[in-house]
Image: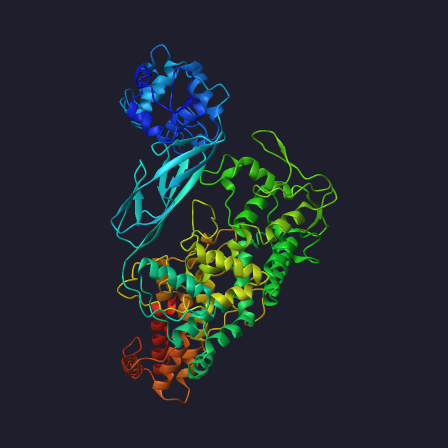
Amino acid sequence: MASFVTAVDHDRFRRLGLSVSFVWLLCACQTFGASPEGPFSFVHDVEPVLTKAGCNGGVCHAKAGGGQNGFQLSLLGFEPEYDYDSVVKDARGRRIFPAAPEQSLLLMKASGQIPHGGGVRLVPDSDGYRLLHAWITQGAPYGDGSEPDLVSVSVVPDRGMVPRGGEQQLTATATYSDGSTRDVTALALYESNAEAMADVSSSGLVHVKDVPGNVAVMVRYQGKVAVFTAAVPLGATVNNLPEARNFIDEHVFANLQEIGIPPSPVCDDATFVRRVSLDIAGRLPTQEETIEFLERTEADKRDQWIEKLLQSPGYADFFANKWTSLLKNRRDDASDITSNFAFHAWIRDSLLANVPYDQLVRELLAATGTVIGNPPVAWYKRVKDPKEQLEDVAQLFLGVRMQCAQCHHHPFERWSQDDYYSLSAFFSQVGRKPTGVRGEDLIFHQRGIATTKNVKSGESLVPAALGDDVGAIPADEDPRLRLADWMSSPDNPFFAKAVVNRYWKHFFKRGLIEPEDDIRDTNPPTNPELLAALEKHFIESGFDLKELVRVITQSQAYQLSAMPNEHNLVDQQNYSRYYPRRMQAEVLFDAIDDLTGAKTTFANLPPGTRAVALPDNSYNKASAFLQVFGRPDSASVCECERVQSSSLAQSLHLINSAEMKSKLAAGDGRAATMATADMPIDVKVTELYLAAFSRKPTAEELQMAVQYLTEPVLDAEGNPLDESQTAQQNLQDLIWALVNTKEFLFNH
C-alpha cells in the first residue's frame, strides 16, 4: 500500500505522474498516496479506482457467469486477491505492460483508445488513470502485507436539514485498523434512495429537488457503507394539530412540524368505521353495525370498535391470510391439503388466542414431529433446504435480505458469505424421514454438532447469528432453539423492528423502512424515533400483536383523513394523511359478495367461508377474480408477490365479466330481494350506500339514484319490463355502479 505520510513531496509525485491536487484530494486527513519509498497497495489504491470507474459492477466485469469478454472481477472489489490475479496474471498478463504502461490493455480499453463495450471509464488526464499508470510503472505490486485493514467509512455531515433546491457537499472518510484516516470523497460511490427528492453527483454533491420529506444518500467505499440523511422541509406553518393520543402521534406530529407539512384533519366516523374494519378484519362493516356506530355518542366509541374487531374471528382470518401466504402455505399436490389446512388453522387459532409473537415464531422454528401432531411442521415440508430456510427466516422475521451474501459480500450491507453460511448452520441438523403417508415427513433434530461449509472458501462454520456469538451448541441440543433465543431477545436489533415495521405498512401503506423487509443501515427509516418507540412498546408488551394493532389504530395519525390539503398532496412518506389503497383481492371479493348478496362457495370448505379465510393458494386457480386482482401464489416471503396496483383487466372484470353479472343477478341476491321488499325507494338507496360506503347518500346522490330506479326498462324488443323486473334490473345497475367507484374499491 502507498505509505502514510504527513507531508507531500511535490517533486516525487510529479515523477510518478501524479498531480499534487489529486494527492491532496485523496489525503485530506492523512496523506495516503503513492511514494517511491513504499509500493502501491492493490487493495487500497487500485481497487478503489476500479470500483469508482464501475469496472467491477454487476453489469460489467463482475457480471455473473464470466464477467465481460473473458475478463471477470469480483463484485465491487470484495475479493481483491482474485481481482489482482485477473488484472495482472490472467490471459498471460496481457492486460498490463510495465515497460510501456500507456500501452497496457487495462488503460487503453478504460480510456477508450481501443474499442471497449463499457465505453470510456477513465480519461487519460484523470487522477484515476494516472494512479493506475504509476502503479503499472512500479511493476503492478499487490502490496507487502503490512497495510492496515479498512475498518469503517464515515460521512460528514451524516444528518442535516437541506432546503428545497439546496445542495450539500458530503465528505467521506475511511478509518483503518492502525487508527489512520483517509479522505475518500473522490473514490466513494454515492446513491440516493429517492431520486425524485434528491440526486447526488459522483463527487458527493447532493442536490435536493422540490419535494419535501426525508431522503438518504448511501456512501459506499470498498465494502463499507455510511449514510447521510436529510430532512427537506416544506416550510409551511403547522398549527391546529390534532391532540396526540399516544406516542405515535407525538413522533409523527413532531416530524410534520419539523419539516413544515400540515396534516389533514381527523376523518369522520363513517370513514373511520369502514377503514378500520377493512384494515383489522378485512371486511366491510354491515349496514347495522355502521348505523349503530354512527348513532353512538361515547367519547371512546372508536376504541371500543377497535377492540370488538380485535376479538372477532375476522381479525384472525385476515391476518392468518397474510401470514400463511408469507409462510408459503402452497398446495402443489392433492396430498398437501391436510397439512395446508392444519397449518392455516394453527396460525389462525394462534392469532385469535393472541399467542405472543416470539412464542409463535419459536414454535414454528423449532417444530418437530408430524403435521397432524404439530401443525407448524408444515413449514419444513414446504421449505426444505437449509439455505432457503435461512433466507426466509432472515427476510420474514428479521427484515434482512441475505440472498446476495450466498455468492458475495452484500453490496449494501455488512453481511459476508460467512454470515450467510453460519446462519444456515442453525438448520443443518434438521432431519426428516417418511411416515408412510404420502407427502408427510417426520421432522426431528438430528443429533450432532451443527456445522455448514462455505462453498467458496471450503471453511466449516458453526452457527452464528448475524455477527452475534450464540455460544457452543452441544450435539444433543437443537440449534434452532438457540436461534429462537437470540431472535426473541429484547436486545435483538432486528426481530421486533421487523414485525412492527411490517404491521405499520399494513395500516399506513408504506413502511417506516421501505421495502418493509429490507432493514439495513443504508436504508434508514423515515422516522427513526417513531420506529424505535414502536419497537420498544412491542417488546414491553410481551410481543403482543393485538396490542400492536391497537396502539397503531388508536392513534390520531392513523385516523387522519385521506383528503389532502394544499400542503400535503405530494407527501408519501411522512403520514400527514391516510394514503388510500385498493382493497386486497380477497377483501374485495368478499366486499362484492356482501354488497351484491351473493353467496360464493369454495371447494372442501363449509358454506359461508369468506375469501380472506381461504387456507392456501389453490383457490386462485378456480377464481379468475382472485388471479386478476393479485392474490399471491404463496411462493415468496416477500409481500411484493401480492399485486396491489390497478389494471385494465381488473376494470374489464368489474365492468363486464360473467362472474359479476352472475352475482348481480343472483336470485337470492340483494337486488332480487330488495326489488320485492316493501320499503320506499329512498330507503333502499340509503341501505345500498351504507352497505357500500358506510355512509348515507348526499341529497344529490339520493335524488339521482331515486330518479334512476323509477325509470322504465325495455327488453330486447323494446317492450317495457314489468314492475318487479324493472325494479330488479335498475337495482342491479345501481349496485354495479357503486362497485365500480373508487370510493368502493379503495380503503380510504
Looking at the image, the residue that sits furthest to the left is 165
Residue 83 place in picture, x, y as percent: 45, 24
In the displayed structure image, the side of residue 414 where residue 113 appears, left or right: left
In which quadrant will I find the C terminus? bottom left
Q: Residue at x 37, y 63 (%)?
A: 579
Q: Position of 408 compared to 269: left or right?
A: right
In this picture the colour scheme is: rainbow
Q: Up-down: is 734 above or below 187?
A: below
Q: Quadrant of residue 593?
A: bottom left
Toward which corner of the image does residue 371 lie, by quadrant?
A: bottom right
Along the line of sight, which residue is nearer the eye, 506 or 604? 506
Q: For this view, does 272 lie left or right of residue 328?
A: left
Residue 368 in the image, given as x and y percentages of width and height: 70, 52
Q: Give x and y (percent) for residue 245.
A: 44, 70
Q: Extreme front residue here?
A: 6
From the viewer's perspective, is residue 458 above or below residue 681?
above
Q: Observer-nearest residue: 453 or 540?
A: 540
In the rendered image, the vertical position of residue 74 relative to residue 697, given as above or below: above
Quarter holding the N terminus? top left
Q: How many marks?
A: 0
